[in-house]
């Protein structure tokens, strides 16, 4: 459903001392010194200086995710993202790969549901840094989309799709997305026909209209100065296409509207697998929702806390119906899903589904206990350093913040926001977002009444 075909890459920055105009700047004076400004190209820049390692992680994101796929050509965003780096002005696919490898850099590109982009990790020593940055710039700004390579990659995608459609988890994911998001991009899927319909001109046009320098978000974490970061952001985006997009290209639809468009139902799909795959949920939360932290704590108690969660206790510990079970909220540009899941023996399907639904409905009605809340908050706060313990994780966080216009102090305030959650606020937030009458249940393999 909320598909994700993301690739991570490493690439270098270019020489210190280069200067570039910044239209406006907003430093965040906080424990995590994130700075943001608008580059001369119009790109939004997110920067965190990290001097511990002689490296730089940088990514450039665009409003070019699968939600922008034209009807009948689902897969175009992923195809375009995958083609970035497979040819550029004066460079073949192999020359690009060798160029990054020769500098010790890693580069990749790809698309997720709401956005697409490229990422690089590189050493900040010279000449590796300048070489990697210059290569990234060429690949991003002067791609050459080769018809033979596109045909090869589309053939691989079709073969991969055919294989995945034999798997129960894929069938469950696709049926779940379709039921939650009718007539919405989050509910569409690639098909053999849609992949075969994608042409070279489609890829070229998608790049020209979606990989826009003035709509880009450039995120950087590493051992460079602010001046270098300013110059690098302009260098990477100045030569990109420019244009405008209608509305908010990353979304904006809230959960009430999406829930109104779908219906609660149970969908059963036959499959010969030994285990049933079960999903249950509904559209629930946009990125930046004001009750995000209430929902995060509430779900940690219900199904996000591993062995200490209610679902795990009821389904695994008390009854031995599954090795594992879970639930989570996945915020997105539009309201991403609340999703609970379990795999169980076919003969246990009805019982596992019944227990999962009963546990969720009881949580909607009564919410957590004070003891559960205290334990969940302690666990989340204690685990927070693991969310930001590498440059790569920091890059992912500040990229998300830039794409969805999150406040610069979001990470600084994270633990304080968790502390604010109360039994009442957690219960009310969960009951507000998770409507029992709208829950969709997908069962692949076994049977339920």
Image (spheres, rainbow, N blue to C red):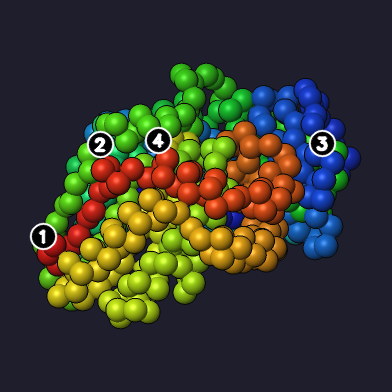
Residue 347 placement (x, y as % from top left): 14, 75
Q: Say if mark 4 contacts mark 1, CB within 8 Å.
A: no
In the rendered structure, are the residues bearing label 3 and label 4 in contact, judged by CB atoms less than 8 Å apart?
no
Cα gap from disc 3 to disc 4, whole angstroms: 33 Å
Q: Sequence order check: which comes first, mark 3 or mark 4?
A: 3
Residue matched to label 2: 262
| Label 3: element kind | strand
> Which residue sits at x=45%, y=41%?
285
Residue 108 position, x and y percent, is: 54, 53
Marks 3,1: beta carbons within 8 A: no
Q: Nearer the viewer, mark 3 or mark 1?
A: 1
Marks 1 and 2, the one that precedes in the sequence: 2
Compute the Cα span from label 1 to label 2.
21 Å
| Residue at the spot of label 3 | 27
Q: Quadrant of residue 187?
A: top left
- What's the residue at 35%, 72% (across, down)? 314
The first of marks 2 and 3 along the sequence is: 3
The residue to which callout 1 is attached is: 449
Q: CA distance from mark 4 to mark 2?
A: 11 Å
Q: Residues within 10 Å of mark 2 (few under 14, many from 20)?
A: some
Residue at image point 29% right, 31% down: 260
Mark seen at residue 16: none
In this rendering, the label closer to the viewer, 1 or 2 = 1
Are the residues flagged by discs 1 and 2 in contact, CB closer than 8 Å?
no
Would you say 75 lies left or right of 49 here? left
Taking depth in this image into account, of 308 and 77 the one nearest to the observer is: 308
Q: Secondary structure at mark 1?
A: loop
The residue where tag 4 is placed is 255
Q: Position of residue 225 (x, y in %)?
A: 85, 45
Identified at 27% across, 31% down, the residue is 261
Q: CA distance from mark 4 to mark 1?
A: 28 Å
């Amino acid at each position: 459903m909320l598909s994700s075909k993301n690739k991570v890459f490493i690439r270098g920055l270019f020489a210190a001392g280069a200067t570039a105009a910044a239209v406006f700047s907003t430093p965040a004076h906080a424990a995590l010194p994130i700075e943001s400004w608008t580059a001369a190209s119009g790109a939004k820049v997110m920067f965190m200086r990290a001097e511990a390692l002689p490296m730089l992680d940088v990514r450039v994101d665009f409003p070019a995710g699968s939600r922008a796929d034209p009807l009948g050509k689902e897969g175009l965003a992923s195809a375009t993202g995958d083609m970035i780096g497979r040819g550029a002005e004066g460079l073949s696919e192999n020359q690009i790969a060798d160029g990054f490898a020769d500098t010790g850099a890693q580069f990749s590109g790809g698309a997720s549901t709401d956005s697409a982009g490229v990422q690089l990790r590189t050493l900040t020593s010279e000449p590796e840094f300048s070489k990697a940055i210059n290569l990234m710039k060429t690949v991003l700004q002067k791609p050459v989309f080769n018809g033979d390579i596109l045909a090869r990659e589309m053939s691989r995608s079709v073969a991969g799709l055919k294989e995945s459609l034999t798997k129960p988890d894929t069938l469950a994911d696709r049926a779940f997305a379709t039921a939650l998001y009718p007539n919405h991009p989050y509910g569409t899927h690639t098909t053999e026909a849609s992949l075969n319909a994608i042409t070279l001109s489609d890829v070229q046009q998608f790049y020209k209209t979606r990989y826009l320098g003035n709509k880009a978000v450039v995120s950087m974490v590493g051992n460079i100065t602010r001046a270098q970061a300013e110059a690098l952001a302009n260098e990477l985006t100045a030569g990109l296409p420019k244009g405008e997009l209608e509305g908010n290209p990353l979304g904006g639809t809230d959960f009430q509207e999406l829930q109104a468009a779908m219906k609660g139902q149970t969908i059963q799909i036959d499959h010969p697998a030994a285990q049933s795959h079960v999903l249950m949920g509904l559209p629930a939360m946009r990125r930046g929702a004001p009750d995000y932290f209430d929902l995060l704590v509430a779900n940690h108690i219900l199904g996000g806390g591993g062995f200490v969660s209610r679902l795990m206790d009821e389904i695994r510990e008390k009854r031995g119906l599954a090795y594992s079970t879970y639930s989570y909220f996945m915020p997105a540009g539009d309201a991403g899903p609340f999703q609970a899941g379990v795999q169980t023996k076919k003969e246990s399907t009805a019982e596992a589904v019944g227990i999962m639904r009963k546990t969720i409905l009881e949580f909607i009605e009564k919410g957590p206990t004070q003891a559960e809340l205290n334990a969940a908050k302690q666990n989340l706060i204690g685990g927070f350093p693991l969310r930001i313990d590498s440059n790569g994780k920091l890059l992912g966080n500040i990229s998300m913040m830039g794409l969805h216009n999150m406040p610069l102090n979001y990470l600084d305030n994270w633990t304080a926001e968790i502390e604010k959650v109360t039994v009442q606020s957690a219960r009310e937030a969960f009951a507000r977002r998770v409507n029992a009458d709208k829950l969709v249940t997908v069962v692949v393999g076994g049977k339920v009444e």
